[in-house]
């Protein structure tokens, strides 16, 4: 009986294994065909992202231009057959229209990428002189990227501008440094504020010095909060500055002994600082970088200026045709609106602003250390 039981158990165990191995010998095993009966389908894909990059703010005609395509819908990366880059001229624009060609067949495609990216180098020869920009569109005529096209050269300059300490005084504004390039500071607006406060009685637990005369010393807070009532401790202090009435750690405050609520009026001075430069007609500041804006010291500036050649027909972008201004707080170009009010008013302020002194004062004595502007 024991031998029969063992034989039956062995048969039950071996049957699933035999069935498993038998299933692996069936014909037609392996990856499924992408297309039935080995058919091949040729068609068009499309892209949903594009970027033009020449490594600079503006694209010079002589610079290399790269086109980055992303989110390419081509069934899979194995099905991406080719990308054709066509372009045509429309008015003052070169319209680049990449075409995604796909070919789906039965070839095995391990780890397919369904939305690949690619980088293409563009060769745009024979561009007419009236063209001022390049744009990228897909077959649905959707605009994805654009870049300004200019003819000329970029010139990099490194220089220093001395910023007088008078720039910190709102009463001195508007104020600017000498010549061009220069820094301009203006007072935009003044916001009145009202703060509430009340006194708080303070008692010394251990006196340090026996003063002949004692005066009240009010310790005002360094920060005021408009929606809170500040508690201002009132301590005793020696009239003589050489004597100390009490240690800071030995003061005890009585929150039940509060004075009447009083009002403190204050203002917020809103000031803006600009980098300003007179430029050749139709030129442009491509980029600029400054060191820390420190009052009473030199500020180092590195600036790339685009100088147009004789064949250049377009202007800008600039604040004016021969004048440009950047706001330091937001690092943004000051542009003109429909009425040209911001740029025109700022230009008038720059023209009429007081020019700061370029002499450094040391210990109230004038030192002849004129800085180049």
Image: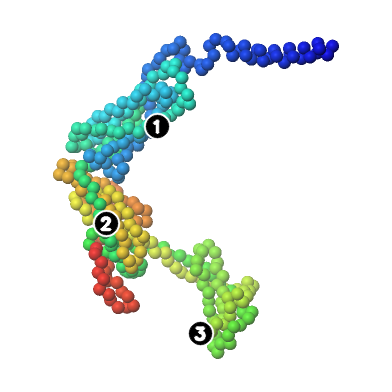
Q: Residue furthest bottom?
A: 212
Check disc 1: other Cα within 10 Å, few if <14, some if 14-19, many if 20+: some
Label 2, on which residue? 158
Mark 1 vs mark 3: in front: 1
Q: Quadrant of residue 136?
A: top left
Vertical placement of 242 versus 117: above or below? below
The disc, 3 or 2, on the residue closer to the chain's N-terminal end is 2
Vertical placement of 25 versus 68: above or below? above
Residue occupying the point 54% across, 64% down: 228
Left or right of 57 in this view: 31: right
Q: Position of residue 94 (x, y in %)?
A: 25, 33
Callout 3: SS: loop
Q: Are marks 3 and 2 in contact (CB under 8 Å)?
A: no
Residue 352 seen anywhere in this rendered image of the structure: no
Vertical placement of 116 versus 251: above or below? above
Callout 1: SS: loop
Callout 2: SS: strand
Q: State the residue in front, 197 or 329.
A: 329
Label 3, on which residue? 242
Q: Quadrant of the C terminus?
A: bottom left
């Amino acid at each position: 009986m024991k031998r029969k039981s063992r034989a039956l158990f062995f048969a039950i165990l071996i049957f699933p294994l035999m069935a498993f191995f038998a299933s692996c010998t069936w014909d037609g095993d392996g990856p499924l065909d992408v297309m039935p009966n080995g058919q091949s389908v040729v068609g068009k894909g499309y892209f949903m992202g594009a970027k033009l990059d020449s490594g600079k703010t503006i694209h010079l005609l002589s610079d290399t231009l790269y086109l980055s395509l992303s989110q390419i819908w081509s069934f899979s990366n194995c099905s991406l057959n080719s990308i054709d880059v066509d372009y045509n001229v429309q008015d003052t624009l070169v319209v680049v229209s990449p075409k995604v060609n796909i070919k789906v067949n039965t070839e095995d495609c391990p780890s397919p990428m369904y939305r690949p990216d690619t980088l293409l180098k563009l060769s745009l020869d024979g561009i007419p002189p009236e063209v001022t920009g390049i744009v990228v569109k897909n077959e649905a005529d959707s605009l994805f990227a654009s870049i300004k096209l200019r003819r000329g050269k970029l010139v990099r300059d490194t220089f220093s501008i001395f910023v007088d300490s008078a720039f910190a005084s709102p009463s001195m504004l508007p104020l600017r440094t000498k010549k061009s390039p220069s820094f301009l500071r203006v007072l935009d607006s003044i916001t009145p504020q009202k703060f509430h406060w009340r006194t708080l009685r303070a008692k010394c637990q251990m006196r340090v010095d026996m003063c002949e005369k004692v005066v009240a010393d009010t310790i005002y807070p360094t920060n005021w909060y408009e929606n809170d009532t500040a508690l201002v401790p009132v301590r005793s202090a020696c009239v003589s500055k050489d004597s100390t009435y009490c240690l800071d750690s030995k003061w005890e405050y009585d929150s039940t002994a509060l004075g009447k609520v009083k009002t403190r009026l204050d203002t917020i001075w809103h000031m803006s600082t600009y980098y300003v430069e007179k430029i050749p007609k139709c030129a442009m500041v491509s980029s600029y970088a400054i060191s820390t804006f420190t009052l009473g010291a030199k500020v180092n500036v590195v600036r790339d200026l685009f100088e147009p050649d004789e064949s250049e027909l377009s202007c800008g972008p600039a604040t004016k045709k021969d004048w440009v201004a950047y706001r330091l707080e937001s690092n943004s170009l000051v542009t003109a609106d429909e009425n040209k009010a911001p740029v025109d008013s700022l230009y008038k302020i720059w023209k009429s602003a007081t020019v700061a002194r370029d002499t450094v004062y040391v210990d109230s004595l004038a030192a002849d250390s004129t800085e180049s502007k």
